[in-house]
Amino acid sequence: MRKLILSLVFVLASGTVMNASSNDETLVKSSCFQEAWDFGTEEGGGDETKEWERMNAYYTMWCMN
Amino acid sequence: MGKNERILYNVVYELKIRGDSSPLLKIKKMKTYLSIILTILFFNTSYSQNFNGIIIYGKKQKTQVFSKTDSIRAKEDPEAHNRFQKMREIISDGEDKLNFELNFKNNEGYFYLKPILESDNNKSLSMYIGTYDKGIYYNKENRIAQLNAYGELFLIIKPKLKWVILKDSKKIGKYNCFKAQTEIIVNSKGRKQKIIAWFTPKIPVSLGPLGYDGLPGLILELEVYKKIYYTKKITLNSKQELKIKKLQKGVKVTEKEFQKIASSTMKKFKKNNGY
């Protein structure tokens, strides 16, 4: 999971550099998704279904607006 | 050998070995023994047929431990840290309002979340209702969980649990409970999670909340990762109608198969940034 997150962070970071002109909203959404993913990982305790459920809840609460 | 089998064995043994030579006496003795056996069988059958119950469980958060990751986040990104804490609070407050019911009759049971009405005070129910809280059916052979995940309805056949009964004991209500521990595998990579149960042999039903079973008594408290399921009310030999739903709808999979589905779905999900 850590490797996955690191690789995603890397992909996101490089994507950010490459698309410096892309709009801010996309950036905010993707970093919010990352935050939701982290929340799911911490609260799910390795159970991917619980992680998915908690991540969804976090995303609905903080990233949908 | 069970208690009844032992009694039967002793009776047969007595008749065989210590049998009187007189045929009349033999018949008399046989009649007496038979009536004893029939009485035992009658009471045993009627007791087990009527032994049912409804147990109400609540769910709460274990005492929260501030992890290393939390401390780092609090320093580096206080806003995100506050959002994490707020989210945990929302989930925990919501879970406090939930009631679960375990209905059982003999060794067959059904555990489910009691429906609650959505109001202004408990908006966004889905946020704190766990995927596993929705319905689990158990009988002597199987534990089957029905859950809606990744846009599909699944029927997951859970593997048998291997419990270790520990020396610790505590009182829950009027019941003396013993501690037991087991380990479950929570993902396709084989990650293990410790489960702790407190059961009472006084209620001879080997069931418990959330599909946990197989102990020599009812589970009154269960610790699963950061959550505790605790007993709120016990009604034995209830005259109320029992809700035991044999779950049939959904794609039937073993837990291992389901974990593989979960893993590949999450990989795709992550790759597509949540889409």
Image (spheres, coloured by chain):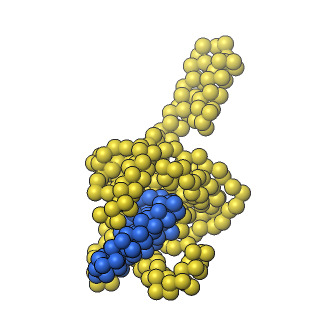
Q: Position of residue B14 (x, y in %)?
A: 66, 23
Quarter of the image where the C terminus of chain B is located: bottom left
Give the number of callouts: 0
Q: Is residue B152 visible?
A: yes
Q: Is residue B24 left or right of residue B235?
A: right
Picture residue at 39% right of the left edge, 74% below the top: A17
The colour one sees for chain B in the rendered image is yellow
Q: Position of residue A58 (x, y in %)?
A: 38, 74
* Res B132 → quadrant: bottom left
Quarter of the image where the N terminus of chain B is located: top right
Q: Position of residue B43 (x, y in %)?
A: 49, 42
Residue farthest along the right direction in this orientation? B167
Q: Which chain is drawn using blue?
A: A
Looking at the image, which is closer to me, B27 or B67? B67
Picture residue at 56% right of the left edge, 34% below the top: B36
Picture residue at 62% right of the left edge, 55% below the top: B181
Picture residue at 31% right of the left edge, 81% below the top: A24
Q: Is residue B108 left or right of residue B36?
A: left
Q: Is residue B93 visible?
A: no
Q: Is residue B211 above or below residue B62?
A: above
